[in-house]
Amino acid sequence: MKIVKVEPIQCDAFWGSYTFAKIETDSGLVGYGECTDWRMPRAVAAGICDLTTLINGQDPMRIDSLLTDMARLSETAPGGVIQRSISGIESALLDIKGKALGVPVYELLGGKVRDRVRVYWSHCGTYRAEYPSAFDTNPIRSYSDIEDLGKEVVARGYTALKTNLVIPGDPASVYSPSDGIVSASIIDKAVNLIGAFKEGAGQDFDVALDINFHYNTESAIRIARALEQFDMLWLEVDSFEPEVIREIKDSTTLAICSAESVTTYREYRRFLDLRAMDVAMIDLCWAGVSQGMRIAHQAASQEIPVAPHNLWSHLATFQAAHFCAALNNVQIMETDVDAAPWRDELVTELPEIVDGDLIVPDRPGWGTNLCENAIKQYPWTGAIPAEISSES
C-alpha cells in the first residue's frame, strides 16, 4: 500500500476555520486527521502541502519512519505551526493503519484501559457572549443568567465546566487586557462569575476558569488568591516559561493547569521536570499523538494527571478519545458543546456522551470519517476572528 495523495481540507467553523489532513492510498483507504489552528489556518494548510513531497509514494503503515522524516525537515524550526501540520498527517496515517488492520486507533497505542472518559463543557458562556447570533439561547445580561447557564449544564448531564472571564451585559463580553494587568474590578467580576456558576450548578460542581496568556505573573497570582474561596477544578494559566507557572502554582491552593500550547516533548519536559503544574494539558491537534503520548507517560511517572485540550470539530474529539482510552493518568477531557451550528454535519459518526462521559468508540481507525460533501457546503471564506474584546 502506498500514499498517492495528501491534501489539506478546510471548512468554516463560524469563528475561524477547521483544518484537516486527508491522505489517500492506492488501496482505496483514506485517512483523516484534524490539526485546527484558528489563528494560523493558512500556515497549517501550507505546512501539509510542504510535507507532501516527503510522504507521497511512501508506505502509510510506517508511521514512525515518516514522523522522523518530517521532524528532520522541520529541525531548524521545530514545534509551532509546522508541528500542527505534522500532527494532522500523523493522525491521518493512524486512521489509515487502524482501518487497514480493522482495529480502533487505541489498539495502536497499547490498548484500551478505559471505556469512558469524563468530559467538561468548555467555553461555557464564552461563545454565547462573543457570538450571540449563532445560538438560540438567552443572552447573558446578568449573573442570574450565568446561574441559569450553570443549571443548564447540569440538566444536560455534564459534571464539570470551564469558562473564560465572561462579563454579563447588553451586550456581554469576554475580557482580556492588552497589558497583562488585572484591576480590582476585574477580580471582583471573576469572583462573581465563578460564584454564579457555582450557585447555578451546585457548590460541589467542578468549575474551571481559563485566563490563557492574558495576565502577567503578579496578576495571575492575584486572580488565583481571590478564587481560593471556591472549590474549583483548576485555574488555567499559560506561559512558555515553566518557572512562571511554577511560581503561580506555589502561590495558591488552587490547582493550576497549563501548557496546552507546548507542542513538542523536548519543550514540554521543562514543565514536567520542574513540576510546574498540577494538571498537564495536551492538545493532540497541535502536538500530535506520538508527542502527546511521550508527554503523558512522563507526567504519569511523576503522578501528574493530563487533560486533553479539545475545542475543535468532532474529529478532534474522536482523536482525543482514543488518546485518553490508552492512558491511565487522564483526569478529564475538554469538549465544546456550543460550536458551529453545522458541526454535526461534517462527520459520519457523532461522539456519544452519556451522563457527562464520552464513550470510547470501537470502530476501526478514529471511528468516524469526514463528510466531504457537507464540508463543501460550508467553505471557509478566509476570515480570522478578531481578538477577544478588551476593556480600556
Image (cartoon, rainbow, N blue to C red):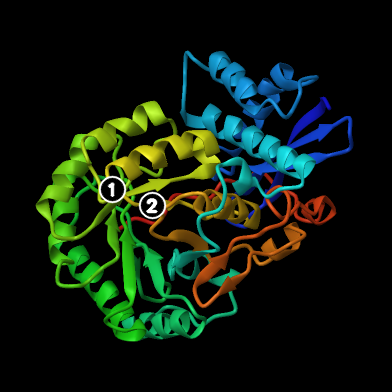
Residue drawn at (55%, 63%) of the image:
115
Residue 329 tag number: 2
Which element is circle 1 on? loop
Q: Type of residue at label 2?
A: Asn
Residue 31 tag number: none
Tell me whether the residue at label 1 lies in contact with that at label 2, contact meaning CB atoms closer than 8 angstroms.
Answer: yes
Residue drawn at (71%, 54%) of the image:
367
Place residue 185 in its image quadrant.
bottom left
Vertically, is 255 above or below 271? below
In x, y percent, where is residue 65?
Answer: 63, 20
First in sequence, mark 1 or 2: give its number.
1
**The N terminus appears in which quarter of the rendering?**
top right
Number of residues whose C-alpha sits closer than 10 Å to that of mark 1, classed few (under 14), some (14–19) or many (20 or more): few
**The C terminus appears in which quarter of the rendering?**
bottom left
Compared across the picture, whether 388 is left or right of 15 comes to: left
Residue drawn at (35%, 85%) of the image:
200
Instruction: Say which residue label 1 marks.
Output: 303
Residue in front for this viewpoint, 149 or 276: 276
Which element is circle 2 on? loop
Place residue 52 in its image quadrant.
top right
Q: Type of residue at label 1?
A: Glu
